[in-house]
Amino acid sequence: MKTENQNFTKHYELIPEDHIIIGWGYPEPDMDADGRIYLIPRFDLTDAFTAGDVSEKELSWLESIVGSGSTRCNHCGKSMKYFALVKNQENSRAHIIGTQCASSMIGYRQEKVDAMHKTTLKARQKIGRVQKKRQAKKDAQAFLDNHKGLERALRVDHYISSDLSIKLQQYGSISEKQIKLAFKIEKQAEERKQKQAEREAQGKSSNHVGEVGDRIKNVKCTGVFSRSFDGNFGTFYIVKFITAQGDTLVYKGSVPYRADQYECELSFTVKAHEEYQGEKQTVIQRVKEIDPKKYDELHILKKERASIK
Ligand SMILES: [Zn+2]
C-alpha cells in the first residue's frame, strides 16, 4: 500500500461504495495508581483487513492519535474520537473516518459502534467509582483530623462503632448524631470496663440467680463471650452474659446470641447452678430476648441509616 502517514490527515471526498471498513479504533480511558487518567488505544481489525493494508509504522502512528483522544475525519474534516479504518478497494489507500461518515460504507456495523461507546462509558463509570472512593477515603481522614478523639471512639469493639467506621470510609463523613453516638458507645464501654475492674478489685463474685426451675423475666445483661462448636446435631453455642448485678449466666444451645458487649434484656428458665473455675454460674435455657429495637442505640442508628439514603 502506498499510503504515507499524512494521508490520514488530509481531507478527501470519499466515494462510499469504493470503501470497505478494515478496522475500528477508539480510546479506552483508564487510571493509573496516582489517579491520572490516560487513554489506551484500542484497535479491532475486521475480517476484511489483510496483512499489509496498513504498515507497522502507520499502525503505531494511528495508535498515537487514538491515544490522543481526538483527530479529524478524512472525509468530512470534523473532529472525532471513535473511527473506522477504511480501505479503497480500487487503489488500496487507507483512511480514518468518523463513525457517522462510515455508516454508508461497506462493512459498517452499528452494533460495533454501540459496543465501542458502551466500552468507553463503562470504563469512565469505573474510573468515576474509583475516584469517588479515593475522595471518600481522603475526606474520611480529613474528617477524623477535624474531630478529635473520633478515630479512637470508632475503634471500640462494638458493632455500631464498626458500622459507623465503615460508613465514614464510604461517604467521607458521618452526621453529628452519629458522632455523638460513637462517643456515647465509647463512654459506655469505658464505664463497663471500669465497673468490671471495680468488681474484681472488691472481690465481689458472681452469685447464682434464682432457683433451679424458676422462670425469671426481664433481666438486663450484657453478652460478653461466645464460642461455637460443631457437634452431631449441628452448631452448638456457649454464650456468657453478665447481669447488671454482676452475676454470670451461661447459655448452651443452638442460638448464636451476640456477645460483643451487646446489651440485652432476657427472660429465661434456670436450668442449673454450677461453678466453673471458682465462679458461680447460672445455666439458663428457654431464653427469650426482649425486642432489641426498643434500645436507643439501635433505634438511633436505624434512623441515621434512613437519613443517609
Ligand atoms: Zn466525517
Image (spheres, rainbow, N blue to C red):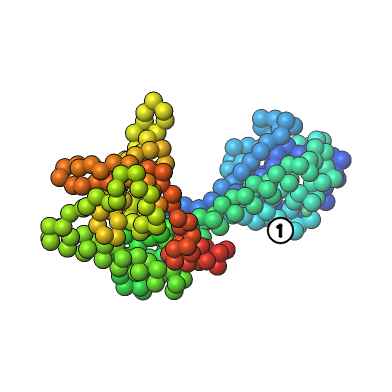
Q: Furthest-top residue in view? A: 232
Please identify the quadrant where the N terminus is shown.
top right
Q: Residue at x 39, y 25 (%)?
A: 232
Image position, residue 307 (x, y; %):
55, 67
| Residue under the image location 78 percent in, 40 percent down | 109
The quadrant holding residue 23 is top right
Question: On screen, 236 above or below 134?
Answer: above
The residue sitting at 54% across, 51% down in the picture is: 30
Residue located beneath label 1 in the image? 79
Horizontal arrangement in the rendering, residue 145 relative to residue 8 (left or right): left
Q: Quadrant of the C terminus?
A: bottom right
Instruction: Report whether the residue tagged 1 is closer than 8 Å to ligand 1.
Output: no
Between 144 and 192, which is closer to the camera in this rendering? Answer: 192
Figure quadrant of residue 90: top right
Measured along the vertical axis of the image, is residue 92 above or below residue 121?
above
Marker count (numbered): 1
Amino acid type, residue under disc 1 in the picture: Ser
Which residue is at the front of the view, 215 or 227?
A: 215
Q: Is residue 291 left or right of residue 236?
A: right
Spot occupied by residue 27 in the image (x, y as percentages of width and height):
62, 49
Across and down, in percent, residue 171 comes to 48, 63
Q: Front-most of 274 and 63?
A: 274
Question: Would residue 184 be visible to someone looking at this image?
Answer: yes
Regarding residue 172, the answer to whether it shows in the image is no
The answer to which of 256 and 68 lies nearer the viewer is 256
The residue depicted at 24 percent of the width and 50 percent of the height is 208
Q: Residue 251: image x %, image y %?
A: 34, 43
Q: Secondary structure at mark 1?
A: strand
